[in-house]
Image: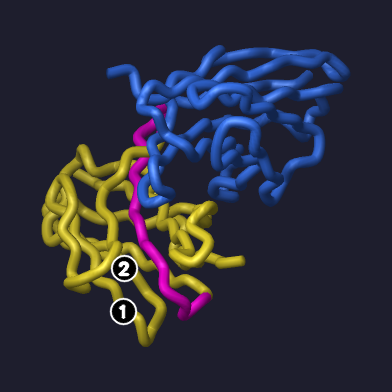
Chain colours: A yellow, B blue
């Protein structure tokens, strides 16, 4: 089974500053990679996904992530955060061979400080 | 387009009671999942289904049961509720296991 590591459980950042949320996964087999966002008392929404092709993936709300196969990483970045970006962010992986299960990290709580 | 609908949104149970969390999707997705979310623990897979009549255990299935009689519905049954089952439960569906669509969650408290 895959494991997903989000090293930073909490990330405070000032408004308009850049941010990077880190994600590493365990296996080097072919995978699909995802970032989801969860606003308070809501379900999870897809921010972006990597299935194949370009390793730089752009998502909604100005977020982007880069797939690095050699480092088994999929870090999420935004050049300038807004107050509205305050939320919980989850990295997830699915194995393209089995495809049935998604494995989630423990989440990173992003707090944007005015 | 309703997507994934979960009911109830909130529920308080006494220890030993049973209940069913309902999940329905209108996207004709084959794959459906139940996750529980606990603070600092991320999402843990309870059960999943790859189609009507087919279910399988995830990481944390103990104390739960599921059924999948139709493509649309995937109810989660809690038997003999315990305080350890206090959590937020999310149902999700997927067409080809490429992207998950989540419901809004069901917050369960067992006292």
Q: Give the magenta range.
A: A27-43
Decide whether residue A34 is among the magenta residues: yes
Image quadrant in which the N terminus of chain A is located: bottom right
Q: Residue at x 44, y 19 (%)?
A: B5
Residue B106 drawn at (x, y percent): 55, 22
Crowd tier of the residue under label 2, counting other residues whose Cα lies within 10 Å: few below 14, some 14–19, many 20 or above: some
Q: Is residue A31 left or right of residue A51?
A: right
Vertical placement of B2 versus B87: above or below? above
Q: Nearer the viewer, mark 2 or mark 1?
A: 1
Residue drawn at the location 49% of the way across and 40% of the way down: B31
Image side of residue B80 versus residue B110, left or right: right
Marks 2 and 1, how far apart in space?
Answer: 9 Å
Q: What's the chain of the residue with tag 2?
A: A
- Give the number of the disc on residue A75: 2
Residue A67: x, y in percent?
29, 73
Q: Nearer the viewer, residue A53 or B85?
A: A53
Q: Secondary structure at mark 2?
A: strand
Mark 1, secondary structure of its residue: strand
Q: Which mark is residue A68?
A: 1
């Amino acid at each position: 089974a895959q494991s997903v590591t989000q090293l930073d459980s909490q990330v405070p950042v000032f408004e308009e500053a850049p941010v990077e949320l880190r994600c590493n996964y365990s296996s080097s087999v072919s995978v699909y990679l995802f970032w989801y966002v969860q606003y308070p008392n809501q379900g999870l929404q897809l921010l972006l996904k990597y299935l194949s092709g370009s390793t730089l993936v752009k998502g909604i709300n100005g977020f982007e992530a880069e797939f690095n196969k050699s480092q088994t990483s999929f870090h999420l970045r935004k050049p300038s955060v807004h107050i509205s970006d305050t939320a919980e962010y989850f990295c997830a992986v699915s194995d393209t061979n089995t495809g049935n299960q998604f494995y989630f990290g423990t989440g990173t709580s992003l707090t944007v400080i005015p | 387009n309703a997507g994934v609908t979960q009911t109830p949104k909130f529920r308080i149970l006494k220890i030993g009671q049973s209940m069913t969390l309902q999940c329905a999707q209108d996207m004709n997705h084959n794959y459906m999942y139940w996750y529980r979310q606990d603070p600092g623990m991320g999402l843990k897979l309870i059960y999943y289904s790859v189609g009507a009549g087919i279910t399988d255990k995830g990481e944390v299935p103990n104390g739960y049961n599921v059924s999948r009689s139709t493509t649309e519905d995937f109810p989660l049954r809690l038997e003999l509720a315990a305080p350890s089952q206090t959590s937020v439960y999310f149902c999700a569906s997927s067409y080809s296991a490429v992207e998950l669509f989540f419901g809004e969650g069901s917050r369960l408290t067992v006292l």
